[in-house]
Image: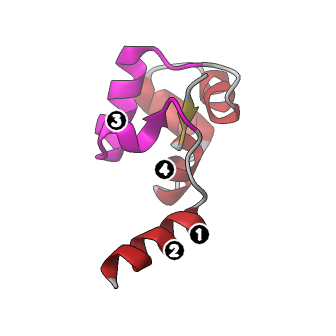
Amino acid sequence: MTYNRIKLLRIEKGLSRKELAKIMDVNFQTIGYLERGDYNASLELALKLAEFFEVPVEVAFSLKPFASISQSLIQHNQKGE
């Protein structure tokens, strides 16, 4: 299974699923399936999404579940101490 942060990245940019799908030249349902984890992006789509959101592909996709945002912030703050 592949995990992703596409929904979070999409919302951060203020885009609807339909708007992102149009930009990526895919069916809007593909974005929904991807966000729910019902579909794994092809390598090409994963790279296009990461490039569009201006993040490394590892920020958008992972083979392991992502830590929650609050957990990530706590870890980040602890590293800064």
**Marks 4 and 3, how far apart in space?**
12 Å
Front position among marks 3 and 1:
1
In screen coordinates, is 5 left or right of 43?
A: right
**Residue occupied by mark 3:** 57
Q: Is residue 61 magenta?
A: yes
**Marks 3 and 1, how far apart in space?**
21 Å
Please tell me which residue lies in front, 4 or 19.
4
**Which residue is at a point 57% across and 54% down the rendered structure image?**
67
Main SS category, magenta section: helix
Q: Is residue 53 magenta?
A: yes
Q: Which amino acid type is shown beneath numbered disc 2?
A: Ile
Please tell me which residue lies in front, 29 or 70.
70
Task: Tell me which label, 4 or 3, sits earlier in the chain.
Answer: 4
Front position among marks 2 and 4:
2
**Residue occupied by mark 2:** 74
Task: Tell me which label, 3 or 2, sits earlier in the chain.
Answer: 3
